[in-house]
Amino acid sequence: MARFFAATERATVEQDNLLRRLLRQGVESDFGREHRFDRIRSYREYRIAVPIGGYERFAPYIERVKAGETSALFSPRERVLMFALTSGTTASAKYIPITRRVLAECRRGWNVWGLRALLDHKDCILRHIVQVTSPMRDHEAPSGVPCGAITGLLAATQKRLVRRYYTSPAAVADIKDPTAKYYTIMRLAVPRDVAWLVTANPATLILLARTADEHRERLIRDIHDGSLSFDFSIPEAIRNALRPRLRPDPACAARLEAICHRHGRLFPRHYWRLGFLAHWTGGTMGLYRSLLPRYYGDIPSRDIGLIASEGRMSVPVADGSASGVLAVTSQFFEFIPAEEYGTAQPSVLRSYEVRIGGEYFLLLTNASGLYRYDIGDCVRVTGFHGQAPLVEFLSRDAHTASMTGEKLTEHQVVLAMQQVCGLEGGMVEFVLAPQWGETPWYRLYLESPEMERLPGLAERMDSALSRVSVEYAAKRESLRLGPVEVAPLPPGTLAARDQALRAGRSRTSEQFKHQYLLPRPGLDTDLRRDGCGPRGGR
């Protein structure tokens, strides 16, 4: 931790040195040879040699790595441990190669974050932690390398000292049924002296608390008897692995019964002595802040940082803020001013050139074989820690919506509607708008009588969105997102709306395009004022 914060005092030099190391590591790869990494001696030469690109630019190389041809992006001696799976901008998922170097950087980032958080909450040290992970092996690449969630790999390879304080073993991540998984996590955690919970998505924290409360009688009985209810779909192998942890605890059961009698509910604020919660708080995730105290009480939240399958981008150092120190030792960063993002020749800045209050899109160069990679994340610079900017996540690009981490893109939404309409049915005008609630959902506005009469339209759109977006499907399956609802509009409503929006953009009216997906809740108030109500149910 001391080394990291010392590095932020000389962030510019650290970034230069890191870029040189990453180029050396990639010099033997096909990508490195094609872009003449061996001739690059400065950042200026790097910019000239390597163009900015999104995942689509790297996909052909990654497909070769998936097939076992590691030298496409790495030294032939490099070993790929897994592919971190995440949603792409189209129907295809993104596969991010995770090597030993990448895994080591992930661990270092979490160690710095975790130690800083615990030093700020010393009463949480050497007490239990509830962490929620996903399986690292969703499926296998053609080479046999697992593809899944990097959180599963991190949990499985964590230091034994840290794993001692996890309330759930890694095997719990493989429970498919979401209610069974949440119940099992709480069955193991409720009797423990839990100090804090950590999960990327705050919606998961709400689901954990609600699951324990909704099944409180069964939970108390299981704790009393040392059992795990057979009312839930849990594979026998996982039950066997958990059995040594399921000891009868009549005293805890009696305490929980007394809590239920006193409060009529069984929420974590009643039975745990919590120090803090750890989760995303930036962007739309901040909407959950008002919901968490009902379940967890008035305790602080510590943002876990801007993290993606592509790696850690920030290390938060204070409670109650989405801002974090740029992870200058983990990735090489470049910044595109938000107002220039998407233009043919945008300005590209180094970390020392950004200004406080400015909004930027990030470019990453890292050990996953990604060079000048456009991740599509917009951040605001809130200050500096030494020479390292403090950044907070704002949103994905203007054509993306994400309330629970689903990262739904406009391209995916249009693709889903095309599937619902059928190949010969043509496209209809519509707007998909995110709706905020304890369980968020999407509302589909449209003014096509033929489509409105289509049987099960809401269910069809929901299924289509799950087919085109692995992240949307995962959030629906885990109950963090509710189903789509349909709201009919009077004929001409959307055309009139577009005309009004176009008129309000006098300087760029010729570039105006109909928005099929609204990026955040609250942007559909004009449509709701039209008197349209939900159809199709949630």
Image (cartoon, grey):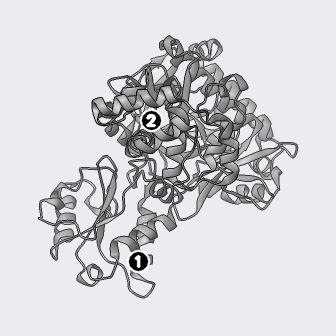
Which of disc 1 and disc 2 is earlier in sequence?
Answer: 2
Distance Cα–Cα, label 2 vs label 1: 33 Å
Q: Position of residue 163 (x, y in %)?
A: 66, 28
Q: How many marks?
A: 2
Placement of 492 over or under 534, stated as above or below: below
Residue 395 in sight in this render: no
Residue 82 in sight in this render: yes
Q: Nearer the viewer, residue 467 or 198?
A: 198
Q: Position of residue 468 (x, y in %)?
A: 50, 66
Q: Nearer the viewer, residue 272 or 229?
A: 229
| Quadrant in which the C terminus is drawn | bottom left
| Quadrant in which the N terminus is drawn | top right
> In the rendered structure, which amino acid carries the disc numbered 1?
Val
Task: Name the secondary structure under disc 1.
Answer: helix
> In the rendered structure, which amino acid carries the disc numbered 2?
Trp
Q: Position of residue 338 (x, y in %)?
A: 40, 41
| Residue ID at (52%, 63%) | 90
Q: Nearer the viewer, residue 231 or 95?
A: 231
Q: Are marks 2 and 1 in contact (CB under 8 Å)?
A: no
| Residue ID at (63%, 33%) | 331
| Residue under pointer 1 | 420
Task: Name the secondary structure under disc 2.
Answer: loop
| Residue ID at (51%, 29%) | 250
Placement of 269 over or under 80, stated as above or below: above
Q: Is residue 51 left or right of residue 512?
A: right
Which mark is drawn over residue 512?
Answer: none
Toward the bottom, the furthest residue is 424
| Residue under pointer 2 | 280
Placement of 202 over or under 177, stated as above or below: above
Which image quadrant is residue 461 in?
Answer: bottom left
**Crowding near pointer 1: few (<14 within 10 Å), some, many (20+)?**
many
